[in-house]
Image: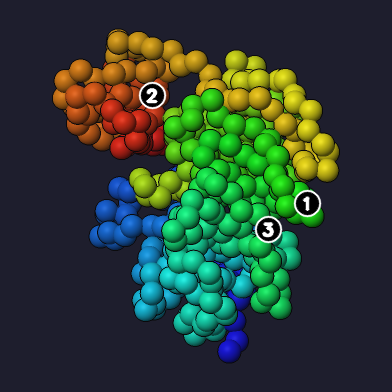
Amino acid sequence: MKKYNVLLMTLLLTNQLVFCQHTDSTKIDIFMTQAQLKEIGLNVNFISSFVETPNRYIFLSSAQGLYVLGKEGIMPVTYVPQQAISSFTITTAGDLYAILDKKLCFLDSVSNFQEVIDLPNSKMKLSAGKNALYIYDSEAISGTNKYTIYRLFPDNNYQKIIETPASINAVTEVEGKILFASENKVYCIDVENKVYSEITYLQNQNEKIISIAMDYSHQSLYFSSLTAIFRLKEGKVDCVNDQFGGLLQCDEVGLVIFNPIENFLVRMRNTALFSLTSQNTVSTAKQTVPASNTPASVSTLPPVNKPNQSTSSSANSSSSTKQTITYNAPTLLISTSGEKYEAKEGYYFVGTLKDGKIEQGTLYDSNRKPVKTFFIKK
């Protein structure tokens, strides 16, 4: 059965489907928001996978099917499969693979999923490397507290790379090395010796790292939680965004961020990412780790904290000011674009206000879960 080549398909759609971006020309591109999905009547729960192709199309998925995002909005790509989709990825050759229950499948030329191999566990996740697919456990192996990463070769044979006692949240390949995130830490695997070394970690043990992405143009490694994004470059870690986090992918323009909980997808441009001031630097110290365990462009670091955030109880300002506000009673919030949202007791907001109204930022509940994100609308 012929495979469905994503790169070819998107080239054929070039005249019909090109990104339409709501843009702050120097900082951020907004590709999708929950409000936009609501406007078109699309009620979908996206899974924690997305891929931007080289020709600027973004693929998303629910458990029931795949979507492609472009100028005309979101178009369905596949029929509803018999089993739920837990993860998908696109290879450098343009082939789309997905995991349906305990089966690895590829998308064929008529948009059906064809089985490749049976997998050892259900609800596994996928990541594409240069010449291999990585398949890993997002949930513990039945009856154990073990999680495994496998490498699948082009001949469909797979190799067990490493087994860990803690959950695996992300896997990526960087310059021939395999990195993975587990809990609040990032590790690099020595495949030959089947050991792994810690690269960096977040001081807050309850803040899980959910994504890793490499920017080769700037030799920078990005990693994120649901509430913040960090960059590791030349032995320093910067918090590049402490208002929201999500799944990451780098392109030549900047850093694409997808938050499947709040259904928004944006891109922070390099012009904004690399205009950070020194106050965002978290740490410059290095640890000594064998070079063979660490990618050449990835330095090893001590724990990472977010930069201190200013706290204010005042919401009156004639200019944009960064604030953290905790609400001790239900409060109606109004944004500069006229959007309204009620903050419940115990909620708190981190972001900027202008003339007493929210300009941009994120509202969190009392458990630190993001519940609403506001963007500047031009």
Q: Position of residue 362 (x, y in %)?
A: 37, 31
Q: Is 67 rendered above or below residue 364?
A: below
**Label 3, residues with CA under 10 Å away: few <14, some 14-19, many ≥20:** many
Tag 3 residue: 161
Q: Is 124 rendered above or below residue 250?
A: below
Tag 1 residue: 193
The residue drawn where x is 31% and y is 37% is 372
The residue drawn where x is 51% and y is 40% is 183
Which corner quadrant holds the C terminus?
top left
Task: Compare marks 1 and 3 and give the one earlier in the sequence.
Answer: 3
Q: Position of residue 204 (x, y in %)?
A: 49, 27
**Label 1, residues with CA under 10 Å away: few <14, some 14-19, many ≥20:** few
Q: Position of residue 81 (x, y in %)?
A: 39, 77
Q: Is 325 rendered above or below residue 184?
A: above
Q: Secondary structure at mark 2?
A: strand
The residue drawn where x is 47% and y is 48% is 258
Give the mark count: 3
Using the rendered image of the protein, determine whether residue 237 is visible from the camera's viewpoint. yes
Rendered image: mark on residue 327: none
Compare residues 143 and 63 and report the one nearer the observer: 143
Figure quadrant of residue 277: top right
Q: Secondary structure at mark 3?
A: strand
Tag 2 residue: 350
